[in-house]
Image: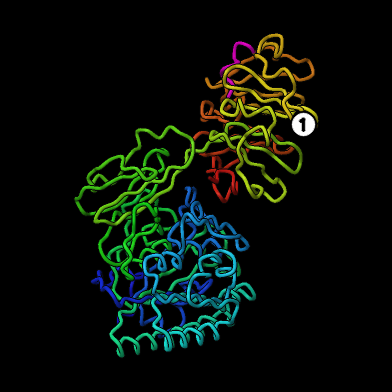
Amino acid sequence: MLNWKSCAAGVGLLAMTSLAVADNKVLLIGIDGLQLEQVQRLNTPNFDRLNITKAYTGGIQGAASEQPTISGPGWATILTGVWLSKHGVNSNDAGLANPEFPGLFKRVKDAKPDAYVASIANWAPINTNFFANEVANIDEVVSGVNDEEVVNRALQTLSQTPADFVFLHLDDPDHAGHASCFGSAYDKAVQDSDRRLGQLLDKVASLQNQNADNWLVLVTTDHGRMPIVGCGHGNQTEPEKTIFIGSNQPMNAEFSQQVTDIPNTQFNSLYGYPSQASIAPTVLRHLGVTIDASWRLDGLPLIGDLGVRKLMEDGSTTQRFTWYTDEQKPANIYRNGELVDQVYSMDRGWSDPDMTAAGVMDYVVEINSTPLALRLNNFQIDAALSKDAFKAYFFRNDQQYVRYDKVLDKSDGGYPKAINNQNWPGMEAYRDLITASFQKDAGTSYYFLKNGQYINYDNIGDKVRSGYPKPINNATWPGLEPYKDQIEAALRWHNQKVYFFLSNGDYIRYDINSDAVDNGYPKPINDSTWPGLGSYAQEITAAVKWSDSRGYIFLTGQRYLRYSISQDKVDDGYPKPVNSSTWPGLLNP
């Protein structure tokens, strides 16, 4: 067996394996929080028995697939083959995974009802929370036992039952890392895991000798650890995003060859390696389960024929994505389940000519009967309103809104919700027209509509006031009438001023006390009037005052700026993407 430590993280390993049929079986071993570099550093003879490649977790930073590098999302991706934007497990205490994207327990049972399926986990939420409904229908479920007992139960299962798919979860390295960071305790946990791995590999080898079953053993982890010290994890750093995938069998080129010819080279081209989303389709293919394009799996099987590889946004526009392949074949492109185009795979990219509707777009690119999916969304923040120090409301272009917890810095559970007369009495008829908003005082908020009208909303009575909407004219908003259909955003400042950003790149300052547009306006949005905002003058979609020290300005392309009120300029490092790290839940489907 090749010694993987002598290779560049698995690059250059043996490629391809033939697909067996009836007696194919899988043992999937997950070892929580196991840092690749620490395994490489230590004496781990049983890991040396495997072919191992570097891989990544956490999705693509800044894209719809981004997810925290923590256990809940990580194990959900490993077991479903899709990212958080689909499986919905956004934390360690989340509830059920989205049943629209089943995990391996259900996929295997649906395809092979007589298969013996087991899940034996140290960390109980895998069985008791995320996949509780699925494991209720499998043959063996063990939860909340220590690593030694996980392995003992697994050895018993492998010895006494005709097991077909067995998932194991071990947790000692993650416990050690959280308790004392990298050091002697973590080293011991790694070496104990290696010893346990050896017991399992020996058992599989024995079974193969006894009955010629074709066992695929996959070993992986859910996340890396924070740089240098290794105490925690959860962020988008290279060490936290770096994981590994190990196999007892040779794999295909997606496993063995890093791709560097991709548009996103962040984290030292980490995205050129396979992702943890590839594990589930690999399990399914080895078990003889045909992967259907309608499943929209985000990972590519690491055995058998290759599909297109490294399917991702190219960064230039939300309508275009790219892939890598060295095969010249017809590629079928599906959008939301419908075949919309066929191109040559060596085009290595496609632009959607019809991505106009707001909402989720699920794309699949398929060659060699091997589909690979990518989820994009066309959500945009059309208006934002900060109610108080605790809650803010964001109105999106898909006729939904999100209530945001400013203290916890995340969207409240259960959102987005529809803008309707139950949630916003009197607003439903105008929900696709909202373009800007601000709160005048505790009792009143204003909503501006694309058709040149506005709504006066009673915050106390929680309803649109009688007689609204009304036209924006020189009687209702003196001086604003000529610009009534150009309003893109409204920003209420601390000095009783409201700034209206216009679609042509100008802005208007409105004085609330005198109830009129100030003299000399409109003026151009440039780096003199709004330092740092000039380049984005015609890309503004919404704005909101967050506190006395800062405001946020949202842009096209799911980006935002943080504006310092005290320094009167855009803060350094912006724009940034609106995603699950910067604004958790704001763009959720």
Give amino acid for label 1.
Asn
Q: Residue at x 31, y 62 (%)?
A: 290
- Give the tally of numbered discs: 1
Q: Quadrant of residue 569?
A: top right
Work out whether 281 lies above or below 31. above
422 within the magenta span: no
Q: Residue at x 36, y 79 (%)?
A: 50
Q: Which residue is mark 1?
A: 459
Name the residue nearer the viewer: 420 or 198: 420
Residue 270: percent from the left, percent from the top?
41, 59
487 within the magenta span: yes
Q: Quadrant of residue 432?
A: top right
Residue 159: percent from the left, percent from the top?
42, 89
Q: Is residue 203 left or right of residue 138?
A: left
Residue 47: percent from the left, percent from the top?
41, 80
Q: Is residue 38 visible?
A: no
As helix, strand or loop, the secondary structure at mark 1 comes to loop
Crowd rating for badge 1 (residues with CA inside 10 Å; few <14, some 14–19, many 20+): some
Q: Residue at x 51, y 75 (%)?
A: 169
Q: Is residue 170 left or right of residue 341?
A: right
Q: Quadrant of residue 530?
A: top right
Work out whether 401 lies above or below 445. below
The span shown in magenta is 481-488
Q: Is residue 277 visible?
A: yes
Name the residue nearer the viewer: 222 or 158: 158
